[in-house]
Image: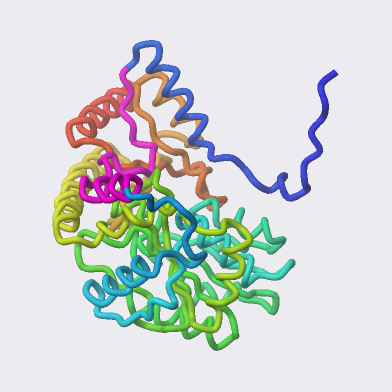
Amino acid sequence: MAERAHLAERMTAIEPFHVMALLARARALEAQGRDIVHMEIGEPDFDTPAPIVQAGIEALQSGCHHYTPASGLPQLRQAISGYYRSHYGVAVDPERIIITPGSSGALQLLMTVLINPGEQVLMSDPGYPCNRNFVRLVEGNSVAVAVDAASGFQLSAAHLQQHWSERSKAVICASPANPTGTLIPRSEMQALAEFVAARGGHLLVDEIYHGLTYESKEHTALAVSEDVFVINSFSKFFGMTGWRLGWLVAPPAYVEALDRVAQNIFLSASAPAQYAALAAFQPATLEILERRRQTFRQRRDFLLPALLQLGFGIPVTPQGAFYLYADCSRFTDDSYGFALRLLDEAGVAITPGKDFGFNQPERYVRFAYTTALERLEQGVERLQRFIHE
């Protein structure tokens, strides 16, 4: 007789990524010989830049694979500090920078240090789904705030005014955002920071898609306030997804507590990944990454008008990341079923809206332009035939 699993109650609130079922189906179809155009995965299709890979190899060969300080290699924290100065014109003390196992590690640290059971964390809906799960892990309560095109699918101070309560403790926002690719204007970021600070709360800003903006240079929330917590990653712009490396910048008063929790949760981030990441800020690497940014922009500038012409609704042009969040209600009232049929019948994989929250998910699908332009063109041709048929 099979033993029954006895899971913690919190597991009832933690849902899987629905797109993973679609991905598994896509892989099964490929194993049968089908050709699938992948526009569902939020991972750059480029390999990690060669200078970073070479630095990682040299680190392993020279024995740099032991534990590092919990807050990270001092020289990597210094390099990130230098990047803030050169890229943003913002001075950040290296002591405020903590290296983490991906941005997920940063969010886990922040929830542990900042949120008590029962306290609320406000976040946008649609938004990155794992955020609410990190809140649940520490017995906090996530508050999904419905956002739409009127605010660029971003939180505003007006939203916070409406939803903040005596139990509210923190706000998570992302700029550029997943799944919409939109940015928070500097003036609105200032308003968010001032609103939260006035109420003794915390503003957590996800900047993991920084570097991948297309109309203008992004600004960091650290330029408007030193009291915000900024989360970033080497995964997206720097192309180091599988290396699992990120960082956070915290106000000085919180650094010791974050370091203490890091010691207990993961001890330190991967040492070879940290040594490899030192090469991420070299001029040769940044030149490679700039060319890739331009490639992503070319893809966006093809896919956006193509989807609009087919009849999808995209009321706000995404300024960053590599996503298009499209209203598909002209074709269906079930975006998940639409995505399944599109995969099975046309060989195109996209992400249904239900992965990103509860704000009319049946109306939306996400397209990721993380594949070559010619494959995007093939995907659009298949999509056109699917819709017309």
Up-down relation of residue 126 to residue 260 (above or below): above
Relative side of 13 to 321, left or right: right
Relative side of 178 to 172, left or right: left
* Residue 249 image offset from top left, x and y in percent: 44, 72
Report the label total. 0
Up-down relation of residue 73 to residue 345 (above or below): below
Asked if residue 133 can be seen in this view, the reply is yes
Query: Residue at coordinates 55% horizontally, 78% vertically from top-left?
Result: 254
Query: Residue at coordinates 49% horizontally, 53% vertically from top-left?
Result: 128
* Residue 291 image offset from top left, x and y in percent: 14, 51
Task: Give the residues drawn in magenta, as a range.
Answer: 35-61
Query: Residue at coordinates 33% horizontally, 31% vertically from top-left?
Result: 38
Relative side of 169 to 207, left or right: right
Question: Residue extending furthest front?
Answer: 62
* Residue 238 image offset from top left, x and y in percent: 29, 53
Q: Work out whether residue 164 or residue 320 is closer to the camera in this orientation and state it.
A: 320
Residue 263 among those drawn in magenta: no
Query: Residue at coordinates 61% horizontally, 53% vertically from top-left?
Result: 133
Question: Residue extending furthest right?
Answer: 1
* Residue 70 image offset from top left, x and y in percent: 52, 64
Which quarter shows the C terminus?
Answer: top left
Asked if residue 206 can be seen in this view, the reply is no
Which quarter shows the N terminus?
Answer: top right
Residue 41 among those drawn in magenta: yes
Question: Residue extending furthest bottom?
Answer: 198
Tell me which corner region of the image, top left, top right, bottom left or bottom right, holds residue 219.
bottom left
Up-down relation of residue 103 to residue 309 (above or below): below
